[in-house]
Each structure stands twice: as structure tokens, then as C-alpha cells.
Image (cartoon, rainbow, N blue to C red):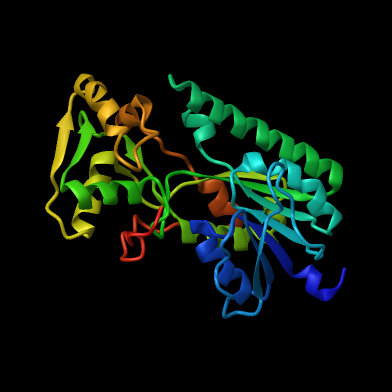
Amino acid sequence: MSGDAARTALVVGAASQIGHFLLPRLAAAGWRVVALKRSAPLPPPCADVRVSWTLLGAAPGRRLTGSEAASALIHLAPIATLPGLIEEAAARGVRRLIAFSSTSRFTKADSANPAERQLARTLIESEAVLAQQCASLGVTWTVFRPTLVYGCGQDRNVTTIARFVRRFRFFPIVGEGSGRRQPVHADDLAQACLAALECPATYNRAYDLSGGETLNYREMVDRIFRALGAVPRIVSVPERAFRLVLPLARTVPGYRDMNMEMVTRMNRDMCFDHSDASRDFGFRPRQFDLSEETLAQRTP
């Protein structure tokens, strides 16, 4: 493999919030980046000549486009879309893979909602297929399972709450909103990719990646209010009443997928230990960071 190919990384899902932080970090570390996006339009040409954009091949069964050799693949898109790409990536010289799954494989496995249970099964099965394919192709892999991801206005958690607060000037929660959360910043996940990329201790391992601060759901919402310069108006609603208004809530753009499992999880702890990641590649996530970029209003 040529010198350029040995330091070339394919990044699938590069337009995601993790990609927003990862691409410049890779380029600054001396990697040439082929950033792949599933649909047009492509971003304007990057000022850094080490980053180039291209589209994934047409659906169904999206494929890597072009024939450029690379040594690494970082897959930021849903992990269920990855197994069909691994063999093609290996044929182009890829021997290192980092992919993102989710702690939802644990928190939604016993959900009362069939779609959420199916999501958990898909995550579990996709991780298993990834490991099998990589073993047969001589590719070392690392899987990251982040908790609640936020960072630049593209997530469905912090950004969704902030959007609701801006529009309605209050936020409803079920009961006390006592479930503990560990929001993890997308830039910390981007740094994790870079730290693990050439770290043998991370080869063929999966890591839960949680944020550096634990707070309950109500505290998280309160912090979002204050970061927006708004007086916190958090309304505690009985679960029974929430069930009655849920059909109406689903008519609001951005909330069509809401279900009662999402609502009742406000009072469930969803915490994970990231000490293995700290030990193996120095993962040190920040406290819950509500900077201006985090709460920027962006087109969904």
C-alpha cells in the first residue's frame, strides 16, 4: 500500500454531528479523509485539501464509490448499514474499522414498544455480524456504544428539548424526571475515534462511551432552559394524562415518532461505565456542555 493510502480514512456518515468534529481532527493528525455522504447535496469543497467529499452508491445496498485505496474505515452511520460495506472496504486495503452502535442495545431490549425492541435486536445482530466479517477478512475492529449524544444541533435529544422550549416556553415531564443521564458530546466521540484508531489495546473490542457528568432528566432540562436564557418552566404531568395527549403531541413536527416508552424513560436511570475506555485509550469526556454551538438552531 502506498504512503498516501496508508494514511487514508474512509468516513461513512461524515455529515453527522460526530463527523462535524472528526473530519478536521483527522486532517490535523495527518490523515487524508474521503468523506462519504448518502445523499446530495455535498458540502462545498473543504478548505483543507486533505478532506474530499463523495456520495455513497445508490440504494438499495449502498456501496462505497470510487476505487481509492485506504487503510481505515470509520463508520458513523447506523451500524445496520455497515455489514454490506466491510468486504468492499477490505478489498480496497482497509484493515482497521471503527463503528458506532448504541447503548440502546441494552436500554431498549425489553421495551414495551415493538419498534424499539427490534432496534435493540438489530444493534446486537449487526455488532455480531461485524465481528464475524472482520475476523474472516483480517480487519481489526472497535465498536463504540455512546449514550445520549449531543454537540452541534443535530441530535434528537438536547436539540429536540431546546426546540420545544424555544417554541412553547415550557417543557412537560412525567413525574419527577428522576432518571439519570450522561450526555456525551460528539466532539469527545470524535476524539475517541482518533485515539483508538492506532491503539492496539482497542482492537476487536466494544466500549460503552458515556459523558463526564451524571444528572437526572429534570436537571438536564433545567440546564437547557438556563443556557437559552429562559426561566425554567418544567411541568410535571401524570403518566395517565400524558397517554391522553400523546396522539396530539405526535402531530407536532419533530415529535411524530414519540411513544410512551420514551416518556416513561424520563424516570429510569440510563447510565454506563466508560472506565474501560479511559484505561485503554484515555477517554476523558467533558461535563455537560451547553455552548452556543450545541444549541444552534439547524435545519433538521
Q: Is residue 280 visible?
A: yes
Q: Position of residue 148 (x, y in %)?
A: 42, 45
Tag count? 0
Q: Is residue 284 visible?
A: no
Judge from the rendering whether residue 127 lies leftward or rightward of residue 166; answer left or right.
right
Q: From the image, which quarter does the N terminus lie in?
A: bottom right
Judge from the rendering whether residue 41 lies leftward or rightward of residue 260; answer left or right.
right
Judge from the rendering whether residue 200 lies leftward or rightward of residue 26; answer left or right.
right
Residue at left offset 21%, top offset 53%: 166
Q: Where is 297 relative to 24, above or below?
A: above
Residue at left offset 62%, top offset 74%: 27
Q: Position of residue 282 (x, y in %)?
A: 55, 59
Which residue is at the front of the view, 104 or 80? Answer: 80
Which residue is at the front of the view, 278 or 179? Answer: 179
Which residue is at the front of the view, 280 or 87? Answer: 87
Q: Position of residue 99 (x, y in %)?
A: 64, 49
Judge from the rendering whether residue 230 lies leftward or rightward of residue 66; answer left or right.
left
Q: Where is 262 relative to 110, above or below?
A: below
The answer to which quarter of the image holds residue 178 is top left
Q: Position of residue 159 (x, y in %)?
A: 34, 51
Q: Where is 135 relative to 117, above or below?
A: below
Residue at left offset 36%, top offset 57%: 287
